[in-house]
Image (cartoon, rainbow, N blue to C red):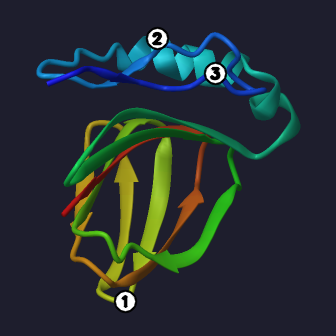
Amino acid sequence: MEPKQNEPTGLRPEGGRTLDAPLVSVDLNKFADVLKDEKTWRTSDRNAITVYKTKGMRIVLIALHQGATIAEHKADEGVISIQVLEGKIRFISEAGTAEIEAGNLATLHKGLRHSVHALEKSVFLLTIGA
C-alpha cells in the first residue's frame, strides 16, 4: 500500500501529514496543542484535524471552546465513537443523552441524529467506521 498524505491548505500549508499507511502512529497531545495554537481556534468556537482516513474508517480530533455546540446532524457513513481526552461534553442523540468527560467514551449507531455541546473547553476523538 502506498501511504497517503494530506495536501497543503491555506490553514495548514505544511501538508505532508500521513493519513493512511499500513501503520500510522498519532501523537494526540501534539495535535491537540496544534489545534489550540492555530488561528481558527482563536477566531472560532472550534477547530479540528483529521488524523487518520482510510476506506471504512475516519478519525478526527476536535477541540471545542466551552459553550460551543455542534448542531444536530447524522452520520450516515457508519457507527461513531466519541472519546473525550480533555474537558466534558454533552452528547445528545435520538437514543439518549450522555455527559462524557475525559477518559470516557460513547458510541452511536449509524444514521441516528445527534449533537455535541461543550460543557467545558474540550478535546475529543471522533471515530467513524463503516
Of all residues shown, which one is farthest toward the bottom?
Answer: 94
Give the x, y percent position of residue 45: 76, 46
Q: Residue drawn 49% across and 26% down?
A: 6
Query: Is residue 130 placed above or below 110 in the rendered structure?
Result: above
Is the Cβ of the residue at disc 3 closer than 8 Å to that at disc 1? no
Q: Earlier in the sequence, mark 2 or mark 3?
A: 3
Q: Nearer the viewer, residue 9 or 72?
A: 9
Q: Which amino acid does the dot numbered 3 rest on?
A: Pro
Q: Which residue is mark 2?
A: 30
Viewport quadrant of the C terminus: bottom left
Q: Secondary structure at mark 1?
A: loop
Mark 1 or 2, nearer chain start:
2
Query: Secondary structure under badge 2?
Result: helix
| Quarter of the rendering containing residue 12 | top right
Residue hosting label 1 = 94
Observer-nearest residue: 29 or 87?
29
Q: Residue at x 49, y 13 (%)?
A: 16
Residue 15, x across and y down, in percent: 57, 16
| Residue topped by disc 3 | 8
Secondary element at tag 3: loop
Image x and y of residue 26, in percent: 30, 17
Camera-side mark, 1 or 2: 2
In the image, residue 64 sits, relative to residue 37, either above or below, namely: below
Q: Which of the two residues, 124 or 5, is positioned nearer the viewer here? A: 5
Q: Amino acid at mark 2?
A: Lys
Q: Residues within 10 Å of mark 3 (few under 14, many from 20)?
A: few
